[in-house]
Image (cartoon, rainbow, N blue to C red):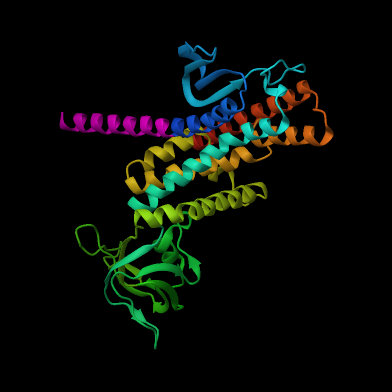
Amino acid sequence: MTSFLGSAATIFTNIGYILLAILVLMVMIVIHELGHYTAGKIFKFKITEFSIGFGKAIFSKKMKSGEIFSIRVVPLGGYCAFAGEDKEVAEEGDFNSKPWWQRLIVLFSGAFFNFLSAVIFTVFLLAFASSGYSKITSVDGVVYETGSPVLEVNDVILRVDGTKTRFLNGGFTNLISLASDTDPIVLTIDRDGEQLDITVIKHQIESKDENGQTILDENGNPVMVSVVGVTTTNHKYSFGKAFYMAFPVTCEMAWDCLVIIGKIFIGRYSLRDLGGPITTISTIATASRHLINLLLLFPVISVNLAVFNWLPIPALDGARMVFVIIEAIRKKPIRRDIEAKIHGVGLFVLFAFVIVVDILHLFVFK
């Protein structure tokens, strides 16, 4: 009976994390569509529907303005529909009746709202979870290079062998694990506003389990691990500094996203490294178990949505912006039916790709 209750509790807990993950993803999508909606209202575009989700409507309400607000059954998307987006002959208030620069701003604003929200989320990440740096809480048995200064409690580790500790490279712990076990390691630290380079050398100690007992290998010998000899905790900024640093940190995340996308296109990443909506929800659900990971995912997902939607890929805002710019240069639009077909094919390919990737993660990549 106890085992059954424990299993049931685990199942309900996992369901709760999955629902939370879906909610997080929906918040990001609603923010994106709200960007289009807000810009459209400013320039008096005729908006026909603002929808949260896809598929059959489970709730629908027509506003006095004539706009329809709806919640649909599949909570993995949404849209802000403008009147006359694909019409050759535009009527007053239609999307294509507006000046090209207004349409460009409306298309740009969805991802821009995602980026702004990423900056806001980053403020809370830096102030309440971590700045991306590690602060030393104890120094025990560190081996120093001859003539090097020594580490002290409250030193903030900025770089490991010249590489800045960042959220997306695993920070201090990961960089130390990748560093050589034989070569000296240069730690750049901040001590009361002064930067110092301190050279340390890894040494081996016995690995301990959570109860402090030595872990033995299959032959009964202690398992040895290479360490620097410090314990650390997450370093946080004051709220004021977090507010000041949020924009550059978000820009760093955006650049990391662009670098990853570039590596995908040149084949540096495999399908195993990619994921669709199901994989994303699974990742968020797992991260939700730890507050710092959840706080990190909010700006990371937001900035990824922003950067990805600005790419000139058919069906995405970036490609639609390209068509508007071409229209501005040519002084006339490309035929609307041709543009619609290009975006339609792009949407089909995009959906097919993420579905295939998710299927591979579910049944192949294990």
Outermost residue toward the bottom? 147
Magenta stretch: helix, strand or loop mostly:
helix
Quarter that holds the N terminus? top left
Front residue of 347/12: it is 347
Outermost residue toward the left? 1
Measured along the vertical axis of the image, is residue 49 above or below residue 35?
above
Measured along the vertical axis of the image, is residue 69 above or below residue 192?
above
> Which quarter of the picture shows residue 199?
bottom left
Say if residue 102 shows up in the picture.
Answer: yes
Give the residue at x 55% y 12%: 66
Give the residue at x 44% y 32%: 27
The location of residue 67, given as percent across then percent down, is 54, 15
Q: Which residues are magenta?
A: 1-24
Give the residue at x 34% y 57%: 238
Say if residue 130 shows up in the picture.
Answer: no
Give the residue at x 32% y 77%: 142
Q: How many marks?
A: 0
Q: Is 284 on the left-hand or right-hand side of 79?
A: left
Any magenta on residue 148? no
The location of residue 339, given as percent across then percent down, is 75, 26
Front residue of 248/135: it is 248
The location of residue 351, given as percent across then percent down, is 60, 29
Q: Is 36 on the left-hand or right-hand side of 169?
A: right
> Which quarter of the picture shows residue 304?
top right
